[in-house]
């Protein structure tokens, strides 16, 4: 059985997902919360280039991301408008996240990539619902089943209720049975940004290697 990490299976999932993905995307298999997923993403070239240019540090602390989310992008915020803890937080941000002097702080960092879809592999549809559900706060998600289950219509209805797409693997071929719902977060969260940053660091490490 080909794994998600194999180029053959990844190519088959990409082919089956062609109507779901934006042009210019890439794919990488990652393990998050103990769950392996094939993530399709698009690099934000301008932000990536900016980080390379200024030798930006990793942005992987939740407190730093929460701090950044309180600041507008590219606009000077007078430090006198912040309380003591907020001033301490902005002054402690990682290199490349913001410009801070005695008077103002200007947020520079934005998300370095966009995740279009995360696909998890599962031997049963219940396992697929549980694993794919872990990615609900972060992106569009789907499960890849190894065999066609009984009562397929009922299973597709259940997956549709949770907004989870369903792929079916047959050898090295993959068929899309149900499209996942669009990812529409009610608000931007530090946890969702952390997920993007974690994937970005993996992508950068692989490129450097």
Image (cartoon, grey):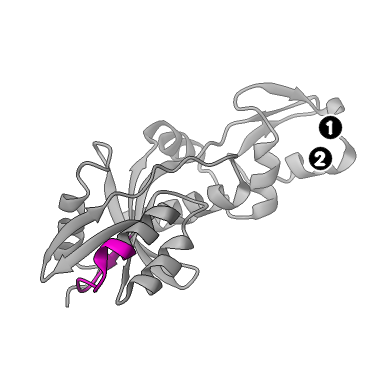
Q: Position of residue 197 (x, y in %)?
A: 50, 51
Residue 209's place in the image compared with 51, above or below, is: below
- Give the residue pinned by disc 2: 86
Q: Position of residue 5 (x, y in %)?
A: 25, 67
Q: Which residues are magenta?
A: 143-155
**Measuring 37% from the left and 69% from the top, which residue is drawn there?**
128
3 on left or right of 154: left
Secondary structure, mark 1, is: loop
Q: Is residue 136 visible?
A: yes
Q: Position of residue 51 (x, y in %)?
A: 48, 39
Residue 116's place in the image compared with 75, above or below, is: below
Q: Position of residue 179 (x, y in %)?
A: 29, 49
**Measuring 54% from the left and 49% from the top, which residue is drawn there?**
192
Secondary structure, mark 2, is: helix
Q: Is residue 209 visible?
A: no
Q: Quadrant of the C terminus?
A: bottom left
Q: Which mark is residue 131?
A: none
Q: Quadrant of the N terminus?
A: bottom left
Q: Is residue 97 magenta?
A: no
Tags 2 and 1 touching, CB below 8 Å: yes
Of residues 90 and 138, the one nearer the viewer is 138
CA separation in Å, label 2 and label 1: 6 Å
Query: How many residues crowd around disc 2 within 10 Å: few (fewer than 14), some, or many (20 or more)?
Result: some
Of residues 148 and 90, the one nearer the viewer is 148
- Give the residue pinned by disc 1: 82
Q: Is residue 152 magenta?
A: yes
114 on left or right of 86: left
**Measuring 27% from the left and 61% from the top, which residue is drawn there?**
153
């Amino acid at each position: 059985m080909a794994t998600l990490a194999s180029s053959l299976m990844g190519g088959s999932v990409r082919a089956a997902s062609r109507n779901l993905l934006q042009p210019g995307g890439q794919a990488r298999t990652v393990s998050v919360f103990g769950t392996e997923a094939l993530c399709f993403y698009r690099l934000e070239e301008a932000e990536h280039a900016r980080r390379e240019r200024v030798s930006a540090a990793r942005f992987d602390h939740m407190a730093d991301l929460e701090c950044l989310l309180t600041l507008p992008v590219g606009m000077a915020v007078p430090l006198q408008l912040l309380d003591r803890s907020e001033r301490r937080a902005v002054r402690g941000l990682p290199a490349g996240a913001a410009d801070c002097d005695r008077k103002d702080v200007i947020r520079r960092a934005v998300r370095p990539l966009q995740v279009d879809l995360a696909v998890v592999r599962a031997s049963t549809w219940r396992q697929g619902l549980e694993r794919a559900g872990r990615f609900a706060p972060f992106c569009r998600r789907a499960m890849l089943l190894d065999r066609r289950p009984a009562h397929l219509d009922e299973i597709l209805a259940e997956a549709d209720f949770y907004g989870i797409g369903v792929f079916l693997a047959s050898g090295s071929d993959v068929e899309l049975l149900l499209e996942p719902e669009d990812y529409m977060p009610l608000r931007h969260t530090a946890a969702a940004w952390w997920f993007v940053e974690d994937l970005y660091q993996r992508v950068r490490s692989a490129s450097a290697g």
